[in-house]
Amino acid sequence: MRTAVCPGSFDPVTYGHLDIIKRGAKLFDKVIVAVAVNPGKTAFFSMEERLEMIKTAVADYENVSVASFEGLLTDFAIRSGAIAIIRGLRAMTDFEYEFQMSLINKHLQPDIETVYLMTCHEYSFLSSSAVKELIYFGADVSAFVPPHVVGRLNAKIKQSLANGGK
């Protein structure tokens, strides 16, 4: 069975993420959406919230599962039996970072390949950060994230504003 890992912080999951996951699921027998604990970032949503939102979003994909991990992606990939890491590319700025990461990952685990999927043009500008900024200022983000994520974003913003914006 050809297994791939599709890692990210998914804070929150967007239609751009789901496009890459769906396309990756056509290429591999099994795709594990790997939600990373990133010590360098302060997450907007808790790990549990992110896992729940992604599980709901990929519920119809029979060969996609969701898990969280801490530590090196390559270690998680090996533990998961993966042969590849799936990454999405939006622009040249993504490429520079992703190229560097793929070289590091190849050094750490030479048997794991990195597979890049170019984002569809309608999501080329989309990021979780942009979605969070838009929702903070009251914009409609329903074109960028699934309905259940819109609801979670609105609830989180209301909670944040009730707590003085924290």
Image (tube, helix red, strand yellow):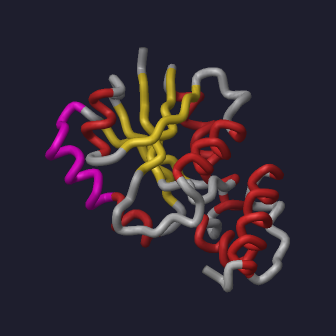
Vertical comparison of 112 with 18: above or below: above
Q: Of helix, strand and loop, which mostly describes the magenta segment?
A: helix
Vertical comparison of 5 with 145: above or below: above
Q: Is residue 4 left or right of residue 12?
A: left
Residue 120 magenta-drawn? no
For image coordinates 83% across by 52% down, the residue present is: 147
Q: Is residue 73 left or right of residue 20?
A: left
Locate the N terminus by quadrant.
Answer: top left
Which residues are drawn in magenta?
99-111
Vertical comparison of 2 with 112: above or below: above
* Residue 50 percent location from the top left of the image: 59, 50
Between 152 and 97, the one nearer to me in the picture: 152
* Residue 91 percent location from the top left of the image: 50, 67
* Residue 34 percent location from the top left of the image: 46, 41
Total numbered circles: 0
For image coordinates 57% across by 46% down, the residue present is: 48
For image coordinates 54% across by 34% down, the residue present is: 66
